[in-house]
Image (tube, rainbow, N blue to C red):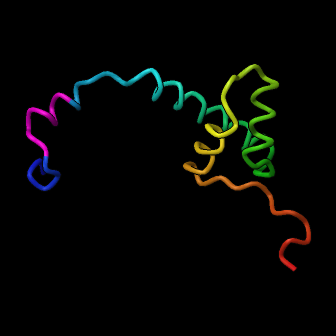
């Protein structure tokens, strides 16, 4: 597999044994909060409203970061009424 990926076995094992970065851990926690808000609102909130909700709960993260994580999770807010006309 290392040959297919173009990495050395030593590099692969070094990567595998590295601890999770602080940013990755923070993103994982933030994604959990995003999922909770999305679930609690029954999928009606998109990234702007999720950002406002998390900010009200004291979770400091930029709107762009929230938007990126929401998009990566595949969540979409409810469509604007009449938008499908």
Q: Tell me, yes or no, whether the highlighted magenta stretch contains residue 12.
A: yes
Q: Residue at the right extreme?
A: 82
- Which quarter of the picture shows residue 11? top left
Q: Residue at the bottom extreme?
A: 85
Q: Is residue 16 above or below residue 39?
A: above
Tell how many labels: 0
Say whether residue 35 is left or right of residue 15: right
Say whether residue 40 is left or right of residue 72: right
Image quadrant occupied by the C terminus: bottom right
Q: Residue 57 or 60: which is nearer the viewer? A: 60
User: Main SS type for the magenta part?
Assistant: helix
- Which quarter of the picture shows residue 74? bottom right
- Which quarter of the picture shows residue 49? top right
In percent of width and height, residue 2 lies at 11, 47
Q: Tell me, yes or no, whether the highlighted magenta stretch contains residue 55.
A: no
Which residue corresponds to the image point at 79% horizontal and 47% vertical from the top-left? Answer: 45
In percent of width and height, residue 25 lies at 47, 25
Say whether residue 33 is left or right of residue 16: right
Say whether residue 68 is left or right of residue 44: left
In percent of width and height, residue 54 lies at 75, 29
Q: Which residues are magenta?
A: 7-14
Which residue corresponds to the image point at 65% horizontal and 44% vertical from the top-left? Answer: 67
In percent of width and height, residue 56 lies at 82, 25
Which residue corresponds to the image point at 77% horizontal and 26% vertical from the top-left? Answer: 55
Q: Is residue 84 above or below residue 31?
A: below
Q: Residue 39 or 9: which is nearer the viewer? A: 9
């Amino acid at each position: 597999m290392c040959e297919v990926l173009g990495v050395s076995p030593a590099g692969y094992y070094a990567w595998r044994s590295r601890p999770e970065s602080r940013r990755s851990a923070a993103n994982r926690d933030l994604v959990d909060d995003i999922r909770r808000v999305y679930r609690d609102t029954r999928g009606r909130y998109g990234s702007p409203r999720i950002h406002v909700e998390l900010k009200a709960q004291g979770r400091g993260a930029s709107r762009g970061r929230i938007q990126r994580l929401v998009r990566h999770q595949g969540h979409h807010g409810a469509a604007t009424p009449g938008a499908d006309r």
